[in-house]
Amino acid sequence: MSDLDAWVVAAGEELGIAPADVPVKAVLDLARDVAHGVVRPGAPVTAYLMGLAVGRGADPADAAERLSQLALSWPKPTP
């Protein structure tokens, strides 16, 4: 088991969330897209926003895909 897997299990147990309910790859991919395409500090904030949306009933895969697409289409700053 990787350190990440162990953390997801422990954090999930602390919050009453089964590891199978945590879309780790989708969250990591989303964080990468936001950090590289928008702004680094936006990655954890976006993951939190996704968590709020999922907690309110949004589909995790759909939320991650929509936010990733938004990040990938975000305009690059002009130098």
Image (cartoon, helix red, strand yellow):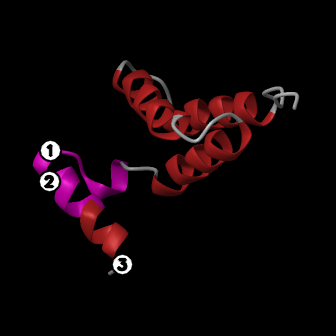
| Percent x, y of residue 22 | 38, 50
- Check disc 1 and report its element: helix, strand or loop: loop
Residue at position x 61%, y 51% from top? 29
The three-letter code of the residue at mark 1 reads Gly
The three-letter code of the residue at mark 2 reads Glu
Residue at position x 32%, y 74% from top? 3
Residue at position x 36%, y 78% from top? 2
Which disc, if any, is residue 2? 3
Q: Residue 44's quadrant in the figure?
A: top left
The three-letter code of the residue at mark 3 reads Ser
Range of residues picked out in magenta: 8-21
User: In whole angstroms, how far apart are the C-alphas of marks 2 and 1?
Assistant: 5 Å
- Check disc 2 and report its element: helix, strand or loop: helix
Q: Nearer the viewer, mark 3 or mark 2?
A: 3
Residues at discs 2 and 1 in contact (Cβ within 8 Å): yes
Which disc, if any, is residue 16? 1
Residue at position x 14%, y 53% from top? 13
Q: Nearer the viewer, mark 3 or mark 1?
A: 3
> Chief secondary structure of the magenta span?
helix
Which disc, if any, is residue 13? 2
User: In whole angstroms, how far apart are the C-alphas of marks 3 and 2?
Assistant: 17 Å
